Image: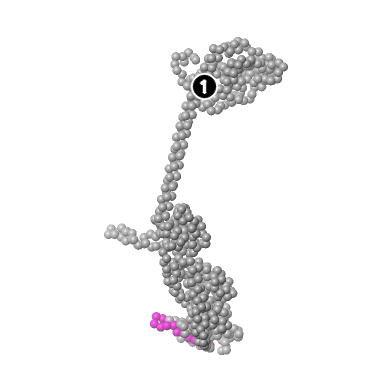
Amino acid sequence: MSDENKGRDLTPEEEIAAARKKKVQSFKLQITDFGFGSDSKPDGFKPPERVQPESVDEILQKVHNKVEGGEKRRKFGEKGGKSKLAPPVYVEPDEDGCKPEREETAFALYDKTDVADLHDNEQDEFEYDDSVISSYSDEELKKKMNLADEESLKAYKKMVKKRCKKKAKRNGCMFKMVWLVMVVFVAVLLGMFLIRGTNDMLAINRGAAPTTAETNGAGNPILGNKQEKKKASVDIPANATIDQVADILTEKGVIKEPLFFKLYASVTKGGEPFLEGSWQMDTDMDYEAILNFLIYNSGPKETVSVRFTEGMSAREIARQLQENGVCSMDKFLEACNSDDYDGDYEFLQNITNSKERYYKLEGYLFPDTYTFFINDSVDNVIEKFLDNFNNKVYVETKRFTGYSEEMTIAELAELQGMTMDDVINMAALVQAEAADEHDMYNIASIFYNRLATEATDGMTPYGDSDVNRLKSDATVYYPYSAKEDVPENIRDAFESTYDTYEIKGLPPGPICNPGEKAIIAALRPASTGYYFFCHKPATDKEAAVAYYAVTYAEQVANEIEAGLRKE
């Protein structure tokens, strides 16, 4: 300890500096003690390129062991031996006491001249200085060195512990801050999810907005209580999963939070299967009502009665079903082209040209008044029509003129050698063209008379040609009811394959769904010699008037009288 430091307590930094200074001195002494002097150099000695990262404790322990054990100091390059003892290495630890920040060469603490002399005299024997040995071996000096080392290490460890504690405290504060931010962030997200999910579960802010607004005396709007209840057409496929149902409901606007809906469904319903079908659903239903509706169909069993008049086409029937909330128009028309019902109804199996038809079931959707459930399945709807047709044509019996026994319509067609499909095809034309029941029998007669001219290439006995074309106006735009009903993008170029102005004979299939009277008229037509007909349109005061003609000349005159042609 220097004179200026005597009589006062040293700081830990000063104690470390003093200890390091002593350590350097003792290290130099150790180097000399091992025989590294300026006048002698070991044989073939080559200092290591890098200092080994030994700690101060390790160096002190080595020196202490050599001194306490009385180990004899050996010379470098001893005669007759090849082994050489490398000089000890001093590594000063970094301030944090964790690892060395730099490495020193083995002779970094040597005097440069001594190192040079060591290499120049590699063959010389290296002598020890006895005085150095004696002084180093002195017990008092050893005690002082040990005391200095212990004080240095104690101060150093204390400083390292203090710094590590500060670092741990600083790192702990940083970790707590990051953890707190993450907890708050997750809590905010979870809170938003729960709020939005709960609102959607209870159907809050879902559904229709007020449709009327009144103003008070100051002219400020007052929202009325009337709500326009929105409905969504939802199509649930067979064996639908909860993921599919959630996506469909979200797309249709029935729910807003699909993830929350799936969580609710998985907790409350346990994977119950969803009912297949096309459903009309209110958008203000809560989750419980939605699941009950789609799983058990336990929603309100509201029914609706719909009357379908004779002569309505499949498209017109489908539109009316959708307008009454029974099922989707598109799904119904898709089913009208399906073969799924053939196995249950023999009359469908007898259709041989279904690919040529716009709708396979056209003509067999028997017109009547039906009661359906709201959001009924398409299969239920189709089967009601087909069951009714089957009952009217194949089950119910009647007594027809000229026959003593009652029979079904199908049996009468068989007696007359006609297929049921041909009968329905003709009955559809009769239904579309006739003004009343009496007119049906005459028009049926005219169509059969025209078809008979096929044997004479469409020539009548009176010289009129091309009569084998039935030229029914109702077939021109089928499956649409009129030109205005044809989609605008294809309207100008549209040509129906059922147009009897272009084709000969009957169209590929029925153009509408005839009633029982038209079917019977097609089976029991009047006996006439007419080939032409026209109608004076009905008015509010007068019914439609039918005109019949044998020749085309008579037809022209009739059209002038009916106001259909100018003179």
Seen from the viewer's position, the closer of residues 445 and 376 is 376
State the SS at label 1: helix
Total number of numbered labels?
1
**Membership of 260 in magenta stretch:** no
Q: Which residue is mark 1?
A: 153
Horizontal and vertical percent position of residue 407: 52, 82
Magenta highlight range:
539-552
Q: Is residue 199 above or below residue 282?
A: above
Q: Is residue 33 above or below residue 95?
A: above
Q: Residue at x 52, y 26 (%)?
A: 97
Of residues 527 and 299, the one nearer the viewer is: 299
For residue 161, side relative to residue 219 (left or right) = right
Q: Residue 156 in the image: x percent, y percent?
A: 50, 23
Residue under the point 58% across and 71% down: 355
Is the image coloured rainbow, by chain, by secondary structure, or in one colour?
A: one colour
Q: Residue 198: where, in percent of width, then height?
A: 41, 52
Relative to 157, is 246 above or below? Answer: below
Which amino acid lies under the numbered mark 1 shown in the image of this protein? Leu
Residue at the far left: name it.
Answer: 217
Q: Going by the picture, which residue comes out furthest to the front? A: 405
Where residue 496 sits, quadrant-wise, is bottom right
Residue 455 in view (yes/no): yes
What residue is shown at x 52% (from left), y 68% (from top)?
A: 335
Residue at 42%, 71% in the rendered image: 305
Residue 540 located within the stretch drawn in magenta:
yes
Q: Residues within 10 Å of mark 1 (few under 14, many from 20)?
A: some
Whole-percent x and y of residue 121?
68, 16
Q: Would residue 556 be visible to someone looking at this image?
A: no
Q: Nearer the viewer, residue 567 or 349?
A: 349
